[in-house]
Amino acid sequence: MATKNIFDFHFHLLFKHKLMTGVDLGKDINVRGIAEALDELSGGAFDSQSSPNLLSKSPVCVGVTSLLAVEHAFANKILHIAGINFSFLLGNLNRKMFEAIKNGETTYYELFKDQLKFYLDNKTRLAKDYNIEYLQRSDAQWKKKPLDDIVKTLSGGKKRYLALSIEGGHNLSNVPIKRGVPSNNPELQLKEIQDRNDVDIMSLNLCHLSFIPEQELSGFAQGLNKGAQFAFKSDDFIPKAGLGITQKGKNVIRQALTHQTKPVLIDVKHMSVYSRFHFYRYREKLIDEIQEVRRLPIISSHTGFTFISMKDYVGKKLFMANKMEVEGEKFCEVIPENRFIGETNDRKNKELYSNPWSIGLFDEEITEIMLSKGMIGISMDQRVLGALKANDGKRKKYYEREFVAEPEWQKLFIDGIFPTGEEKFIEELFGRPPRAERHMMLFCMHLVHAVHIGNESMAWVENTTPWDHLCIGSDFDGLINPLNPYKNITKMDKMAEDLYEYLPVADKYISSGKSKALKYNEDGSVNKAFLEKVIDDVLFNNGVRFTARYLRNWE
């Protein structure tokens, strides 16, 4: 089964070109020599995965490309090993920009606007050389067409249509980085972007991967594990303070969702688990006040799942919680139990495990997003889905520790309850199966699990299926460690073939399923027509229909 077209809910088109100097837009970023070995140790973060050149050779023809300013935590220490700075091996790194970030000589908002200008300045070339068109709701061609006709246009294959998103609320901060001056009205920067005629933004992540002291909008979840922190070192990757969404965060959410002509969706990826549940409840209150907000879906653009309900995780205390103090600074850690989620059909090594860190969605959240008519993009980062570099088979009882902000740690992981009103709130003896198989099986397990959860909670919703709310959110060029053998966006042409092979296996061997995600014939064989349909939907149709809704401003 050949892959025709693909929708990718989250990737970065020009991010790495902006990180470098003197690299032509038509060239890929490739590190060589010692830097190549260091890049491999850090998970393959520096080589291009979704440049314009690679995109032009890929089956991705509709998607969302994300813009973000480099955070201080990433600029702090790049490839520092045993006290030695190896970042010079990265060649054309934009050192002027990194030094300005590190020394507080710029603002995140200026960096964001500069990156946005880079995208817009190259708009003509991207259209001419790569048939790339940025989507805007204000374009007359979309306003005049019904949804089905928009879907046909987007699916036509003549152009590659890309919507834009903003990854991280820090991009709205207009004060010098880490200089102790607060950014008091980030919603005004968002409004300025929404009011512009030359750009349109589909979604915004309230936070990203590090603590932003000058502008805290919500708690963030730890996202970088030990391997990823090999390349970047900063204490700001560790959540320490804050509980839920701040008043500044609420102001940004209100501005995002209530703009009259160009509302921006909130992407819950990267928010801490407490903050995510806080957002779901705050959104309900906003809907009570402003009914138009109800039409705006919730999204998680590039995520994995914990494969458990929050109620069970907290209530049954499926973790260890510890508190420590280092040089007067308090750190709170949660060490979750490894969570077996299913198996391959390989007799030598069958076990598959999720990544149980709280950055992944809990079962209640899958339901929340689907019922909002939202979309969930499954990440193609192997770490997010649960694969480990080593010991990727039978595991010990506990997974790698994650750090949690102390107020959230006290509220959830010690007391074990949500605040009032927020209840919704390998090592193997005989070797391993191929890593490519393990990674695709993990991807399929996530799809099947989401359908199981949706089947249980959406039975009363007519003319819909959980399969309608799932897609790919690769996060290529977001400094990820991609699934084997999907090194970059060009390799996605075999996605359909792999899903056709592994989805039935995942549906058979997943541990959490009370029902089946696929349809079966009377003789027990998989209904091939249904299987092919849901593969087409996940790879392309769901995302295109979602994009068409966006272009009609969520009518």
Image (cartoon, rainbow, N blue to C red):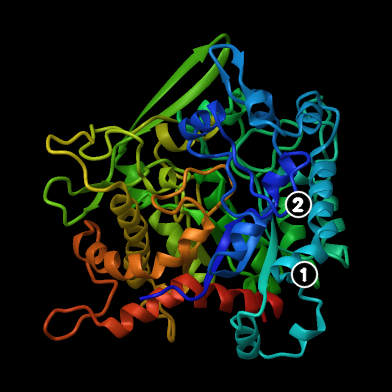
Q: Position of residue 303 (x, y in %)?
A: 48, 53
Disc 1 marks a residue whose amino acid type is Lys
**In the rendered view, does 191 fall on the left or right side of 433?**
right
In front of the other: 10 or 309: 10
Q: Is residue 250 left or right of residue 35?
A: right
Q: Which residue is situated farthest in the front direction here?
A: 33
Judging depth in this view, the residue of 449 and 298 nearest the camera is: 449
CA–CA distance between discs 2 and 1?
40 Å
What's the residue at 54%, 26% (across, down)?
A: 34
Dot 1 surroundings within 10 Å: few (below 14), some, or many (20 or more)? few
The residue identified by callout 2 is 251
| Residue located at (69% from left, 43% from top) | 217
Left or right for 386, reference 348: right
Residue 330, placed above or below residue 210: above
Q: Note whether 231 is above or below 437 in the view shown.
A: above
Is the residue marked by circle 2 packed among few (<14), some (14-19), or many (20+) residues within 10 Å?
some
- Quarter in which the C terminus is drawn: bottom right
According to the picture, the residue beneath numbered tag 1 turns out to be: 128
x, y percent for residue 152: 61, 87
| Among numbered discs 2 and 1, the one appearing first in the sequence | 1
Query: Would you identify the image quadrant in which residue 507 lies?
Result: bottom left
Residue 139 location in percent, x, y?
81, 79
Which residue is more in the foreground, 531 or 137?
531
